[in-house]
Image (tube, rainbow, N blue to C red):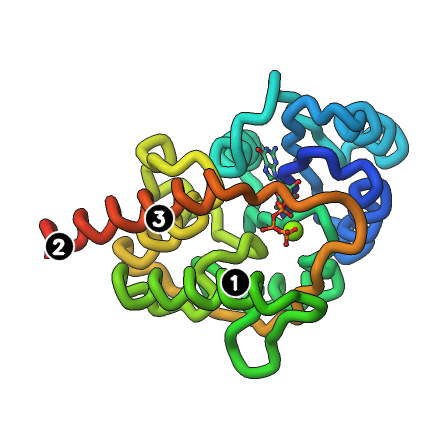
Amino acid sequence: MTIAFIIPTYNERENIVDLVPAVLAQNDDIHVIVVDDNSPDGTGELVEELAEKFPGRVAVIHRAGKLGLGTAYRAGFQLAIEWGADPICTMDADFSHDPRYIPAMLKDSPLHDLVIGSRYVPGGGVRNWGWHRKLLSKGANLVARTLLGLEAHDCTGGFRAYRLGLLQSLHLDEIQADGYSYLVEMLFRCQRAGTKIKEVPIIFEDRRRGASKISQKEILKAMGTVAHLALTRLTRD
Ligand SMILES: Nc1nc2c(ncn2[C@@H]2O[C@H](COP(=O)(O)OP(=O)(O)OP(=O)(O)O)[C@@H](O)[C@H]2O)c(=O)[nH]1
Ligand SMILES: [Mg+2]
């Protein structure tokens, strides 16, 4: 049995060195796929060293440059599906998604197509975020839920466990978003496919090391994705 954890990285050197062992320690069946976009800080090379330290349990996909979070997930999914891994999970590299929640997510995974590590269900929350980050995240989720009719409470987080069958049934190559809004589009498609979703509470802590990669451009692009999906919904419903 293989459980895959896809971790996209861009300049996460200070985090990845501790994160990969912490993830592997949660379950003997876990295999990690790091998708690194030629990070200037040498994250990719560091992960190669981790792959030697944990033989057979760490794979690295090296991409030529910063190609976006969405396409990084896509590359990771492709490899994990080839492996036949089930479930196929995603998480951030910066410890905002604490590995200690992995057992609870894996416990619920067999009975659900998708398990979300969620900030916005009872017991969940965020720590050390300024008001502007809180507002941006809450606002994005409010928009996703109202305009797109999404039923999940945390539509923008990347701490997820997808069943292999779900990923095989979705046409992943048709997903248009290539950046952060990939997460919203993915959820939109999951809900359309009648996916059974469970949200497990997590406390999301702001990154302590390294820098955020969300730019104004990504936020604008995400608005465009939501508008496009809202139109799709209007024309199809
Ligand atoms: N491969 C790849 N990974 C990326 C890219 N952009 C972001 N990431 C990774 O995606 C994850 C989420 O990015 P963050 O910058 O932490 O975004 P965030 O968690 O929404 O924002 P912060 O709370 O400010 O950290 C991290 O592991 C990043 O290293 C990209 O273009 N390519
Ligand atoms: Mg982060």
Name the residue type under label 1: Ile
Q: Is residue 12 left or right of residue 227?
A: right
Q: Quadrant of the C terminus?
A: bottom left
Name the residue type under label 3: Met
Give how far apart the Cα atoms at labels 1 and 2 are.
Answer: 26 Å
Q: Is residue 136 left or right of residue 7?
A: left
Whole-percent x and y of residue 175? Answer: 34, 37
Residue at the outermost bottom position: 122
Q: Residues within 10 Å of mark 1 (few under 14, many from 20)?
A: many
Q: How many marks?
A: 3
* Quadrant of picture, ligand 1: top right
Residue 69 in the image: above or below residue 112: above
The answer, for residue 82, to whether it is visible in the render is: no
Q: Are marks 1 and 2 in contact (CB under 8 Å)?
A: no
Residue at the spot 24% in from the left edge and 44% down from the top edge: 228
Residue 182 in the image: above or below residue 141: above
> Which of the two discs, 3 and 1, sits closer to the camera?
3
Front position in the image: 189 or 217: 217
Residue at the spot 80% in from the left edge and 25% down from the top edge: 42
Q: Which residue is mark 2?
A: 234
Q: Which residue is mark 1?
A: 116
Whole-percent x and y of residue 25? Answer: 82, 54
Q: Which residue is mark 3?
A: 223
Q: Residues within 10 Å of mark 2 (few under 14, many from 20)?
A: few
